[in-house]
Image (cartoon, grey):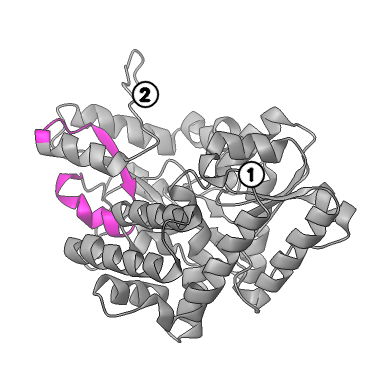
């Protein structure tokens, strides 16, 4: 990679889809821009360079590459790359669970009992990050997968029915009953002000060593947690969603995509950079040794991070849950999070919240198809 390359990096924690669409509409498209993978690959495909035939594709993990294809083109093309793979699931403080004499919960009833036990022992059970809209999409994936399974259908097909306005949340007890029961439990045994607890607050609360469960996060938080508390003993697994431990699965995959703008004035320089990133010795080692993330490339290199290694082990033993958030756009996922925040705030009840989610799913994602 040539030296003296300047990278101007712009990010925002909130409302990124709106910012990106404004830049596209104004013609000020970044050389590289981000979206979720899956459905949003086609949302931004007309602006994205097809990386097919580039060295980066040969180095890319097969599962990551599959998430970058175009569904509208029948699974063809490679319209994005990933900055990381990921594992999504429930994080726990193993020392607290050991002190309470309990195992990591694998059913929803186990989770509720664990929260009661932990609180009775003098600990806080949960920290949630419920101020952030995106934590809800991470929490709900196992519930979506279990709901579809219970109804004998694929998660993607179930989501498509909601997008078409052909399904109701009440049709799926795992969503109507279990999901809201889980949220109610997390609020009851969680942060004093859940809607004021952002990612930083959640990390601080968990790393302090007095909280048993961290919700809505994954492999990306471990470095921050250990920087605060190097002695923290972390455990990691799937979310307990129903009465079947088999449905408590870690979700793996790449939910984010970086797109190379096909009409970039710096197109060749950008291609040189992404190819170098995925194929050079330093670029490949950066994922594990510098960023500490799940590598989106083909590699056998082990990670020093517990969540990555336990996530890998869980997937090997129980399989991976479907990366179901990628069947929806992030515009919908944000609306979903905001609807759940209204429910937690008490400004809407469960039925009104379900009606709002159904409306948003149809109007936002149904219109996008």
Residue 245 vs residue 346: left or right?
Answer: right
The residue drawn where x is 17% and y is 63% is 367
| Figure quadrant of the C terminus | bottom left
Disc 2, SS: loop
2 and 1 marks in contact (CB < 8 Å): no
Disc 1, SS: loop
The residue drawn where x is 47% and y is 32% is 283
Disc 2 residue crowd, few under 14, some 14–19, many 20+, Cα 10 Å: few
Which of pointers 2 and 1 indicates the residue nearer the eye? 1
Residue 181 vs residue 276: left or right?
Answer: right
Residue 192 is marked as 1
Residues shaded magenta: 26-48
| Figure quadrant of the N terminus | top left
Instruction: Say if 128 sits above or below 69 in the image.
Output: above
Residue 133 showing in the rendered view: yes
- Please name whichever residue, 178 or 102, is drawn nearer the observer in this view of the structure: 178
Q: Position of residue 114 (x, y in %)?
A: 76, 62
Quick one: label 2 or label 1, which is nearer the N terminus? 2
Give the residue at mark 2. Answer: 1
Which quadrant of the figure has residue 314?
bottom right
Q: Position of residue 265 (x, y in %)?
A: 14, 27
Which quadrant of the figure has residue 274?
top left
Residue 225 vs residue 153: left or right?
Answer: right
The residue drawn where x is 25% and y is 27% is 269
- Please name whichever residue, 225 or 56, is drawn nearer the observer in this view of the structure: 225
Instruction: Say if 103 sits above or below 246 in the image.
Output: above
Disc 1 residue crowd, few under 14, some 14–19, many 20+, Cα 10 Å: few
Which quadrant of the figure has residue 316?
bottom right
> Label 2, label 1: how many angstroms apart (C-alpha)?
49 Å
Q: Position of residue 229 (x, y in %)?
A: 74, 31
Q: Position of residue 29 (x, y in %)?
A: 18, 33
Does the stretch in magenta take in 28?
yes
């Amino acid at each position: 990679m040539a030296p003296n390359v300047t990278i101007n990096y712009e990010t925002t924690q909130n409302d990124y889809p709106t910012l990106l669409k404004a830049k596209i509409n104004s013609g000020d498209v970044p050389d590289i821009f981000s979206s979720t993978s899956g459905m949003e690959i086609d949302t931004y495909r007309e602006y994205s360079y097809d990386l097919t035939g580039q060295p980066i594709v040969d180095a890319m993990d097969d599962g990551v590459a599959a998430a970058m294809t175009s569904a509208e083109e029948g699974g063809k093309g490679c319209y994005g790359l990933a900055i990381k793979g990921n594992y999504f699931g429930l994080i726990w403080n193993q020392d607290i669970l050991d002190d309470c004499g309990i195992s990591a919960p694998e059913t929803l009833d186990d989770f509720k009992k664990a929260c009661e036990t932990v609180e009775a022992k003098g600990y806080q059970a949960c920290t949630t990050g419920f101020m952030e809209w995106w934590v809800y999409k991470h929490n709900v994936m196992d519930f979506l997968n279990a709901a579809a399974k219970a109804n004998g259908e694929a998660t993607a097909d179930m989501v498509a029915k909601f997008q078409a306005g052909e399904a109701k949340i009440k049709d799926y007890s795992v969503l109507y009953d279990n999901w809201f029961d889980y949220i109610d439990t997390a609020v009851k045994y969680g942060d004093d002000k859940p809607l004021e607890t952002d990612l930083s607050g959640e990390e601080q609360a968990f790393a302090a060593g007095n909280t048993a469960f961290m919700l809505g996060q994954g492999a990306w938080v471990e470095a921050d947690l250990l920087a605060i508390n190097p002695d923290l003993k972390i455990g990691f697994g799937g979310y307990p969603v129903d009465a079947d431990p088999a449905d408590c699965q870690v979700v793996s995959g790449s939910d984010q995509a970086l797109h190379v703008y096909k009409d970039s004035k710096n197109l060749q320089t950008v291609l040189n950079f992404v190819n170098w990133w995925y194929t050079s010795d330093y670029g490949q080692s950066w994922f594990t040794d510098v960023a500490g993330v799940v590598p989106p490339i083909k590699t056998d290199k082990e990670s020093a991070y517990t969540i990555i290694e336990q996530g890998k082990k869980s997937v090997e033993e129980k399989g991976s849950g479907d990366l179901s958030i990628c069947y929806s756009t992030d515009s919908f996922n944000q609306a979903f999070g905001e609807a759940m925040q209204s429910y937690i705030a008490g400004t809407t009840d469960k039925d009104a919240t379900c009606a709002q989610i159904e409306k948003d799913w149809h109007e936002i994602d149904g219109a996008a198809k």
